[in-house]
């Protein structure tokens, strides 16, 4: 009995000693730092991605919201309940083939998805939570407006300059609109060059969703400088126009051409000879602009439609009376969009390029009358648009002063045809 007691006593001492050593070690250990660095959550579409397994796919032809959910373990009664719950909030009836969607599965189980995300557009998406608290909502991504600078040297076409230089190719059409009255972009010269200050819209910081507007530009064409600065001369109407550095309106009473991009294939020529007719002189009293079938044809000036008809030679054609001095005509349309008696504005689509009537290829024949006589529109001194008022001229010159300085300070670099420094201005809008 004594031996047993001694053994138990010794065992207790060992345990006590060990406990003290452990306690001592814990006591002597360095204090634990309470400042634990928290890993930022990986949030997308309003969900913590670390908590889900995300399966991203594209809509296939024939896919429906219901078929996608049923293929992923959600039976029809549940689908019906989901559709009924989100009915007045979002619509997922028409899913567009090729567009992306994502299914969010909880990591603890992949039997059924918890959420469905549909992205029909780059700047928005639709969220449908499928379990727990069912809901649906459309989310429009915030848009960041960034002011940028760019320049280019023309080697061939304006569009080619944009694409090879890394500039947003939409600038081609925006510059064409700004200079529609002053420059024929199918008659640019090699060596022409431009500088531009513009604003571009982005979502997710880096994804461009298009040009917002051009703020200022200078286009050197055929040895002449064409400045352009945006300005709103009438705050009530809210119309933005472009003026040069001397406050002269760039807009003219007539556009240079009835199509935005289309080379002149046959000019006004009263002495034109045609081989098909035995090389006889057959005057051409119009100007032909080649363009693919379906290209919009624009009214070159404000006016009243006095003819919208069809004839054997002209095909589908439209005639517009602008005032007692000028009228224009547009031939060989695929289809007409305007009717007799309708008022049209400059730049309005009045029809589409076709091959109706006597024509060997798709184009629009543009005819121009002055005082009842057909003339060459390129040789006419056409009236300017309404000038800026004297009262506003001082305001305008003050408003463009900084922009002109910024524009003039952009350097042309012949060896590098492109400068594109993204300037996130302090007053950049977040919409």
Image (spheres, rainbow, N blue to C red):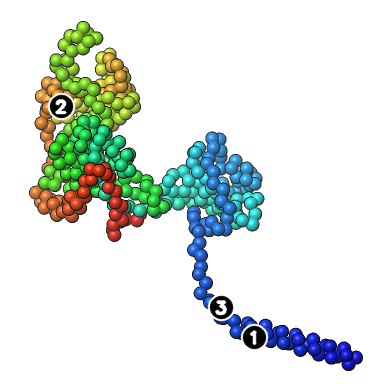
Say whether disc 1 or disc 2 marks the residue closer to the N-terminus: 1
Q: Nearer the viewer, mark 1 or mark 2?
A: 1
Bin the neighbour count of mark 1 within 10 Å (Cα to Cα): few under 14, some 14-19, many 20 and up.
Answer: few
Can you say which quadrant of the picture contains the C terminus?
bottom left
Q: CA distance from mark 1 to mark 2?
A: 102 Å
Q: Residue at x 68, y 85 (%)?
A: 21
Percent of width and height locating residue 268: 17, 21
Can you say which quadrant of the picture contains the N terminus?
bottom right
Picture layout, residue 416 above or below residue 423? above
Task: Find residue 32 and name its label.
Answer: 3
Quadrant in the rendering for residue 187? top left
Bin the neighbour count of mark 3 within 10 Å (Cα to Cα): few under 14, some 14-19, many 20 and up.
Answer: few
Picture layout, residue 33 above or below residue 285? below
Which residue corresponds to mark 1? 24
Q: What SS does tag 2 mark?
A: helix
Quadrant in the rendering for residue 308? top left
Q: Outermost residue, top direction?
A: 278
Which residue corresponds to mark 2? 377
Q: Residue at x 10, y 24 (%)?
A: 371
Q: CA distance from mark 1 to mark 3?
A: 16 Å
């Amino acid at each position: 009995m004594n031996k047993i007691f001694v053994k138990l006593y010794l065992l207790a001492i060992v345990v006590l000693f060990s406990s003290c050593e452990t306690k001592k070690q814990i006591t002597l250990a360095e204090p634990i730092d309470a400042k634990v660095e928290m890993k930022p959550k990986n949030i997308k579409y309003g969900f913590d991605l670390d908590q889900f397994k995300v399966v991203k796919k594209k809509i296939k032809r024939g896919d429906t919201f219901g078929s996608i959910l049923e293929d992923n373990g959600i039976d029809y009664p549940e689908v019906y309940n989901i559709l009924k719950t989100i009915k007045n909030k979002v619509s997922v009836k028409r899913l567009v083939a090729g567009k992306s969607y994502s299914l969010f599965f909880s990591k603890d189980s992949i039997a059924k998805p918890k959420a469905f995300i549909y992205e029909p557009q780059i700047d928005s998406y639709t969220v449908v939570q499928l379990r727990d608290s069912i809901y649906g909502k459309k989310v429009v991504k915030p848009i960041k407006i960034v002011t940028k600078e760019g320049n280019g040297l023309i080697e061939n076409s304006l569009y080619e300059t944009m694409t090879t230089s890394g500039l947003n190719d939409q600038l081609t059409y925006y510059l064409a609109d700004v200079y529609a009255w002053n420059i024929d972009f199918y008659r640019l010269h090699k060596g022409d060059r431009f500088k531009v200050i513009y604003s571009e819209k982005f979502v997710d910081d880096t994804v461009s969703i298009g040009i917002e507007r051009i703020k200022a530009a200078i286009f050197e064409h055929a040895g002449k400088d064409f400045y352009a600065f945006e300005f709103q001369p009438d705050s009530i109407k809210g119309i933005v126009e472009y003026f040069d550095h001397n406050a002269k309106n760039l807009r003219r009473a007539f556009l240079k051409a009835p199509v935005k991009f289309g080379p002149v294939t046959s000019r006004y020529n009263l002495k034109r000879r045609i081989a098909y007719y035995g090389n006889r002189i057959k005057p051409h009293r119009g100007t032909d602009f080649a363009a693919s079938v379906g290209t919009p044809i624009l009214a070159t000036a404000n006016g009243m439609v006095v003819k919208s008809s069809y004839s054997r030679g002209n095909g589908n054609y439209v005639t517009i009376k602008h005032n007692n001095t000028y009228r224009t005509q547009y031939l060989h349309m695929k289809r007409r969009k305007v009717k007799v008696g309708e008022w049209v504005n400059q730049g309005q689509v009045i029809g589409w390029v076709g091959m109706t009537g006597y024509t060997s290829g798709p184009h629009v024949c543009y005819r121009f009358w002055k005082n009842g006589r057909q003339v060459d529109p390129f040789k006419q001194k056409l009236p300017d648009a309404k000038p800026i008022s004297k009262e506003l001229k001082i305001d305008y010159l003050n408003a463009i002063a900084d922009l002109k300085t910024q524009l003039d300070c952009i350097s042309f670099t012949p060896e590098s045809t492109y400068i594109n420094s993204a300037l996130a201005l302090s007053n950049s809008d977040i919409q």
